[in-house]
Image: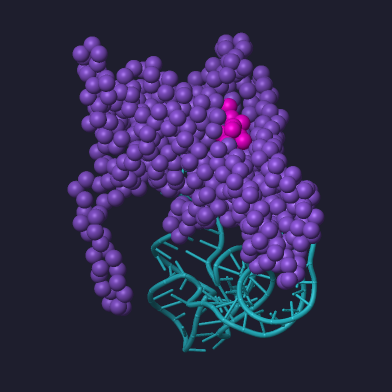
Chain colours: A purple, B cyan
Amino acid sequence: MSAQTAITPTRDKDFPEWYQQVVRAADLAENSEVRGCMVIKPWGYGLWENIQRQLDVKFKATGHVNAYFPLLIPLSYLEKEAEHAEGFATECAVVTHHRLEAVKQPDGSTKMVPTGKLEEPFVIRPTSETIIGAAFARWVQSYRDLPLLINQWANVMRWEMRPRLFLRTAEFLWQEGHTAHETAEEAIAETQQMHRVYEEFLRDHLAIPVIPGAKTANERFPGALDTLTVEAMVQDRKAIQAGTSHYLGQNFAKAANIQFLGRDNTRQLAHTTSWGVSTRLIGTLIMAHGDDDGVVLPPRVAPQHIVILPVTPKEETRQEVLDACEALASTLRAQSFHGEALRVLVDKRDIAGGSKNWEWIKKGVPLRVEMGPRDIANGSVAVCRRDQGPKAKEFVPKEDFIGSVVERLQDIQDGLLARATAMRDANMKALDTLEEFQAFFAEGAPGGFALMHWAGSGDDEERLAKEMKVTIRCIPISEAFAEEGKCFLTGKPSAKRVVFARSY
RNA sequence: CGGGCUGUGGCUCAGCCUGGUAGAGCGCUUCGUUCGGGACGAAGAGGUCGUGGGUUCGAAUCCCGCCAGCCCGACCA
């Protein structure tokens, strides 16, 4: 009965299957009866709430405010920006009716039949550029109305062919920032600022190192002039786009007619941006830090920082132990970690201690604290860290633990980032020739991020994507990638290396 | 939208070829023994066998339609 690892198969054996098992074992989410749509369970949603709250603080700190726009977009709005419309056309859910009629069947059952066909169908938003653009057009009259810095927390729907929990679902939760500016320079600066916010959030909150960079024209958001991305590497060495920030130029302003009277008394089009991250961050988090015993959560976003497990071997001392655990929890909750009160749960459920312990291992709680009669007598607690083995346990004086708990959490947070960074760096290589490139991504090879000199065309890029399933993840912003060289495919001069990888 | 596969208690699946009216493991409930620990034993609850039709005395099992899901391609946060 005792398995080596809590999750089978292990990451090495079958990474995609491991991922699915982890999502289930950690009780994060499940597939629903609606195709491609997931039920996010409390543990997974708690994670999202923390991500949401902490990002929201950063958005507010950079001058943005939240608003909410309709779920349904008039079909005609999507026809205004051709490139954008084409980009999303194949994955739109369309609302065509507005009422149902109950029709009695011969067998006595009732069938609901849609009636009330709509003159103009609505599209369930795949993203909200068009409808927010329409609002912006009403709100902006003068350069004095700019910039307009709006964010929306919402659900969107993209009828994906192949859904996977958190990574690609038909409906998903996200935030979409939409801003309008007087000048291109300001809009570009905004795009870059939010790109940095994402980079920092991934690094400091999710403990995931990313490579910030720009997408190539092929990979750009439909309708954007420039798409910035933060690319993370997860444990199967594939890349995942964790956040994007788009400079939209005047394309959407033109489509939505966002005009204003400028300082020089001329009518001008606004310069807009949009930027977003989604529940995909949770999938990224799982794949970046998870191990063969389940999820490993960075303390900053964990729904619970600490779970206290009362050890109650004897009925006589049971109440005493529970009281002591509650008292410890209260003491801990008075402390804070990065400005948030410590989240501490006392798991009083009357189930076998071992399975209870394993449940929290699988859920990835950063610290587990056991306290039983012996600990109370000794004034100690048993502390287990999720970033160490499931059996690793340290007995420490209770007062010492209380005094060091914040430090311990930060140590776990830092350790996860260090581990993820080491993993990424170990699988990132600068290569120079086509042969090296092919060997790097050959079947059976470990793969990873290949840093290549590139001066090829969009068609060259597409061919590589088709033939080798490898794409340019980004053209890094960092000067660390800058150096003179020759394109590995065309031999043309190149001033910077780009990141090639397989991706999610 | 093309190619392959699958739909059986909460979960994973067996049974289908060779029709006779439903099984296992896990999970769940109760009791007992354990218990700093993903325990053991016993008893028990739980199933229109995706759906509609056909063949048959009789269908989870054979035939046809439909629906849903999974995997492989094109698309994607």
* Residue ID at (24%, 55%): A98
As drawn, is A15 to the left or to the right of A196? right
Q: Is residue A209 magenta?
A: yes
Eyeballing the image, is B53 above or below A467?
A: below
Q: How many badges with numbers are in the image? A: 0
Quadrant placement of the N terminus of chain A: bottom right
Residue A167: where, in percent of width, then height?
A: 52, 44
Please tell me in which quadrant of the rendered image residue A472 appears. top right
Question: Is residue A200 among the parts visible in the rendering?
Answer: yes
Eyeballing the image, is A51 above or below A458?
A: below
- Viewer-proximal residue among A496 and A51: A51
The residue range painted magenta reads A202-211
Please tell me in which quadrant of the rendered image residue A256 appears. top left
Residue A271: where, in percent of width, then height?
A: 33, 22
Residue A100: where, in percent of width, then height?
A: 25, 62
Eyeballing the image, is A166 above or below A487?
A: below
* Residue ID at (65%, 55%): A327
- Viewer-proximal residue among A214 and A408: A408
Q: Is residue A191 magenta?
A: no
Residue A454: where, in percent of width, then height?
A: 57, 18
Eyeballing the image, is A470 above or below B33?
A: above
As drawn, is A289 to the left or to the right of A113? right
* Residue ID at (56%, 22%): A476
* Residue ID at (58%, 27%): A211
